[in-house]
Image (cartoon, grey):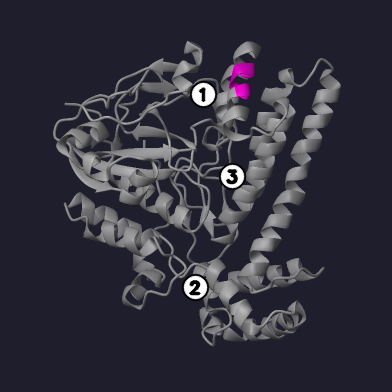
Amino acid sequence: MPITIPFDNSYARLPDSFFAHQRPMPVIAPDLIAVNQRLALELGIDPDMLGSLEGIAVLAGNALAAGSEPIAQAYAGHQFGNFVPQLGDGRAVLLGEVIDQNGIRRDIQLKGSGPTPFSRNGDGRAWLGPVLREYIVSEAMHAMGIPTTRALAAVSTGQKVQRESALPGAVLTRVASSHIRVGTFQYFAARQNTEALQVLTDYAIARHYPEAEGALGLLQAAIVRQAKLIAQWMSVGFIHGVMNTDNCHIAGETIDYGPCAFMDRYHPETVFSSIDQRGRYAYQNQPDIAVWNLAQLATSLLPLMGGDKDVAIEKATEAVHRFADLFQSEWLNLFRAKIGLRSAEEGDAALIGDLLARMTAGDADFSNCFRALGTAKARDQFSNPAAFDQWAPAWAARRVRDGSTEEEQATLMERTNPAVIPRNHRIEEAIQAGVAGDFAPFERLNRVLSNPYSEQQKEADLTRPPQPEEEVLQTFCGT
């Protein structure tokens, strides 16, 4: 008896050019790794039902829930600056959409569920490592208050996936406000399919930005969301790793956790992606890449911005150029809070920049350094504590001028500087343990990271930066 999920599948009602009808491919021996009970309840789904044999069959792709209309979405994208006119869901199937308990429409998608017409000769599968990584990191991001796709469940498949070696397979169930990307617009723009582009624009506005007016309004709204999102990434030391246009969500959610990571030692040129040989998507480059991606969205939308092309280009260019000020304002607000400031002064950017430069020179751990601010341990984060001592008086004077109490400033810093982040070496430990059949480290990480701003003394080892032999310098795409 198939389980029932209250699907209402609006994307599947769009023209056939938007997707391919595609059922997931069954696996040999599905077994449950995790169900996100809180998220299931938020979606109006019984988590016990998902954990049943019938539920596991749906999460693995072996069965369809009643009401599911599985599709693989079409999109294009710039990958490391090179345009690919057709990408699409090569290893993912959108099972359908639900209206959650807050009245918000959410996609439920299987990732690693087998080949689709967009697989480009790939097997459409995922191995266990990337599934655990995305589950851990996406849920940690959510707990930090950063817009993101979510992880509803993970299952093992009982079969191997061939990469450099034979690896255990798994399927992730991902939840998103949609899976519409900049690359979705590029797909139709590249085909000069203005009619489909208009349908997509109207759909995206209705689903994400009902207050927006037309294509220009959609562009302006997406720019605001992306500016806030990238500033939030920067504030916690997160590096996406592959900011291709097909990984740029139209509603400003973090999507597609492939070779991503949180920095340990702070350095603005840090790169973790094994395929980013030139540092295109380094930490410090993320704002500029976001502008580049948004410019591609603007170009795609130009045919819908009125008859006078020159006027349309001028308006779209003006909109994209607003990103810098929007981002800088959001970045300053976040980093002011990270050093305990509620008010704004002209020299705040220089004060914060000075601290970051000293952190770079002093090999300071990004998260631990900010978390320690206001305590005697802050200076201990630097290889040369005198570097912090030289910065501290200007900070102390600025805190006095801020006008709020020390207690208020301390509370603000605790709320904006996570005590624990999903560190690379801990994720790698969880993956290796999972490969051996032990998911206790994975479960522990998820439990602790669900309260990232709380001091959890019994879990203090998870806040420790890696020893040299523990460092994970590269992370890999899940394909």
Q: Which residue is mark 2?
A: 368
Q: Residues within 10 Å of mark 3 (few under 14, many from 20)?
A: some
Q: Position of residue 442 (x, y in %)?
A: 28, 57
Task: Pick whichever of labels 2 and 1 is earlier in the sequence.
Answer: 1
Quadrant of the image occupied by residue 152: top left
Q: Which mark is residue 229?
A: none
For marks 1 and 3, give the one nearer the viewer: 1
Front in this rendered view, residue 259 or 13: 13
Q: Residues within 10 Å of mark 2 (few under 14, many from 20)?
A: many
> Can residue 153 be found in the magenta stretch?
no
Q: Which residue is mark 1?
A: 75
Residue at mark 3 to residue at mark 2: CA–CA distance = 26 Å
- From where the camera sits, is residue 167 visible? no
Viewed as shown, does residue 194 lie left or right of 273?
A: right
Quadrant that contains the C terminus: top left
Amino acid on which disc 2 is placed? Asn
- From where the camera sits, is residue 152 visible? yes
Quadrant of the image occupied by residue 27: top left
For marks 3 and 2, give the one nearer the viewer: 2
Q: Position of residue 202 (x, y in %)?
A: 63, 22
Q: Which residue is mark 3?
A: 280
Q: Main secondary structure of the magenta part?
A: helix
- The segment highlighted magenta reads 197-202
Quadrant of the image occupied by residue 82: top right
Q: Position of residue 10 (x, y in %)?
A: 47, 23
Amino acid on which disc 1 is placed? Tyr
